[in-house]
Image (tube, grey):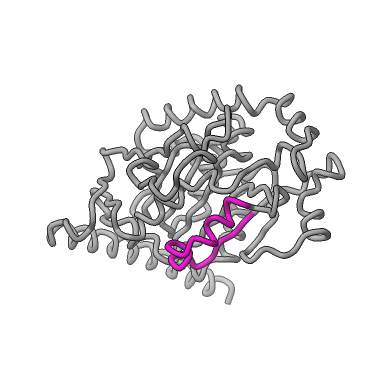
Amino acid sequence: MADANWAKGTIIEEEEDEKRLSENHAIEKLRFGLANHIHYYKVKKTKNTVVEQRSGRRRLYDHNLILRSIFRNKLIHKTYGSLGNLFEGAVFIDFGSAILYEEGAVTVRDLYEDQLLIGHLSKLVATDINDTSFDHTRYIEIHMNEREPFPFSFNEIPVLIDDPEFIRILTRVYAKNEFTPLIFRSTNSGPDLFYTVEEMKEHFSSILEANPNRNILYFFNRFIFFRSVCSDRFQLIGTIDERIGVNHSFSAWRYVDWDKRGFEDAFHPNLRYVRMVEESRLALGDRMDAYFMNQSCNFGRGLRFYGNKFKKSITKS
């Protein structure tokens, strides 16, 4: 569980944005995440597994388009500059990757096979639960015993991801250091569909508490959240096109011409925080302001982190 101080506070910088998240989450929970829904997903067969594992190639390909543009420095934060600079070399962790559907973790494979994107990520991590309710929902065990290894990293997660220590350990396993940026995703998965609003907020709070020294990007349902190391709260920087990736009525992503679809089709920016413009078009002064702001925050976080480590070593000795 997250620290009580975090749980009492807000997780999103703007109150209206947090209200929007909570209201959308409550609706998603009511439509898709009640106990009877979850039981149905666990027992209803589909293809080579059950509905709980259902996914689809390119279902979340809008995320690919958005990340490509980010790493081309085409999404600019009004305070912190190019998000591409902030997330170069990030660890990408996908919560609930449907590891048994078709060839397994198909939306993570879409990221792995994207040559315009994968070179910008230091690690790509698929995850899933190991539900012992039924033999066929022991997803981790089935994968380990019956499937070929993934070409990317893979980790088991609990049903409820609300423990900062678990998240801290998970990220440290894959991150190069304490300051490596993180990209999380929970889209059509447990945290964004099955959690209660309170559990969802605990989940967000735990991520914040576990990673104070990292820039964080979180694709959560149709929302995209950003947390700078300069802040202790997320900002809602935009949404994806909800007609495609989070469409539960029919498989809309199968009918998209992905060769013609662009960043502007996939992403709806929150203009309070970001602009869809190339970094090269920014004034030099604006770029320098963002650079020094980020450097100052990183220096402060680093000083605090290593200072605390030094104090602990002195105490132990």
Highlighted magenta segment, given as a residue range: 106-126
Q: Is residue 281 left or right of residue 93?
A: left
The residue at the point 84 percent across, 39 percent down is 133
- Whether residue 119 is in magenta: the answer is yes
Please determine whether, in this image, residue 317 is positioned above or below residue 113.
below
Q: Which residue is at the front of the view, 49 or 163?
A: 49
Please determine whether, in this image, residue 123 is positioned above or below residue 81.
below
The residue at the point 55 percent across, 25 percent down is 26
Quarter residue 194 falls in? top right
Please determine whether, in this image, residue 68 is positioned above or below residue 188.
below
Q: Is residue 134 left or right of residue 51?
A: right
Q: Is residue 111 visible?
A: yes
Q: Give percent across and percent down for residue 177.
A: 49, 70
Q: Give percent across and percent down for residue 47.
A: 75, 42
- Whether residue 114 is in magenta: the answer is yes
The residue at the point 46 percent across, 31 percent down is 21
Q: Which residue is at the front of the view, 90 or 9?
A: 90
Which corner quadrant holds the C terminus? bottom right
Which residue is outermost to the right? 135
